[in-house]
Amino acid sequence: MKQSSEEIKKTVREKYAAIANQSKEENEQSCCGVGGSCATVDYAVFAEDYSKLKGYESDADLGLGCGIPTEFAGIKEGSTVLDLGSGAGNDCFVAREIVGEKGKVIGLDMTEAMIDKARDNADKLGFNNVEFRKGEIEKMPIGGNRVDTIISNCVLNLVPDKPKAFEEMFRVTKPGGNFCVSDVVLKGEMPEQLRQDAEMYVGCVSGAINIDLYLSHIADAGFRNIEVKKLREIDLPQELLAKFMDENKAKEFIESENGIYSVTVYAEKPACVPGSGCC
């Protein structure tokens, strides 16, 4: 039975509250970040290595990302950055290193335990220009035209109403601002049950959609100059494919472009938005 938006959000809050109280190593070795170890599930299958980045704080890295959005975001010194689904603060602290003392970083998360963990990390580091707010991406507690750059790491796939999420991102971004997000998407056709099990393999509550639909939501929200900066296919284990197809079909599937991917997308809000009186 398909979950409602509120049921999905409740599941995400519960799961990430549990994850917040574990170490990165525990998350990497457990089923979807929670519970005992699993033979086939690898929650960190998407994760990239942050350890050599300036601003990296090990206590804020729970190994939950699927890219490094700051890599392509074009963040400038002194700018205001918003991190959606900021977790324990990993990407926020990397962004803070770039914006410097004169900039500002806002982390937004809907899980209280993650907010607490992120604030503890910021206090420990002595930062006074990094703040964490509790809220949902589809209804952000942030005024319009406030941020220069939005980043997000493997979070938007969890949002039930993706068009609304991109509309909110457009609303809070300054004219001429931009976003860069890493996320989970699908390419091609996948049998429904295989898709559900594949999502379990890469994060349990993935909610990934087709990449073409994903990009169309971005354009429909008003963003322009949309670019796929990075696209990486995730190899699904043979034992997972074997549950739904014979050896020949599995081989065909592997050789096709169908599957589940991590993607990093960049887009810009026009400097002049039609209807705003500036054009």
Image (cartoon, grey):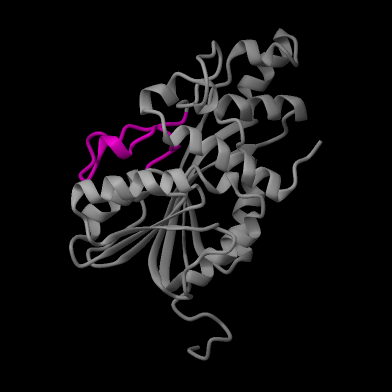
Which residue is farthest bottom? 277
Above or below residue 235? Residue 188 is below
Q: Residue at x 67, y 16 (%)?
A: 241
Image coordinates of residue 218 in percent, x first then y, are 58, 59
Residues in magenta, as a range? 46-68
State which quarter of the image contains the N terminus: top right
Identity of the residue drawn at 59% across and 60% down: 138
Out of 272 and 167, give the one closest to the viewer. 167
- Considering only vertical position in the picture, is 126 above or below 56? below
In this view, 1 is above or below 84: above
Which is more toward the observer, 20 or 206? 20
Whether residue 237 appears in magenta in the rendering, the answer is no
55 falls in the magenta region: yes
Q: Quadrant of residue 62?
A: top left
| In the foreground, 184 or 139 | 139
Q: Is residue 266 visible?
A: yes
| Residue 52, horizontal then vertical, whole percent | 22, 35
Q: Is residue 119 above or below residue 14?
A: below
Residue 210 seen in the current view: no
| Residue beneath the point at 60% across and 53% down | 215
Q: Residue 191 at what x, y percent from top left?
A: 76, 27
Residue 180 placement (x, y as % from top left): 43, 54
The quadrant in which residue 44 appears is top left
Which of the pair 55/110 is nearer the observer? 110
Q: Is residue 242 left or right of residue 16?
A: right
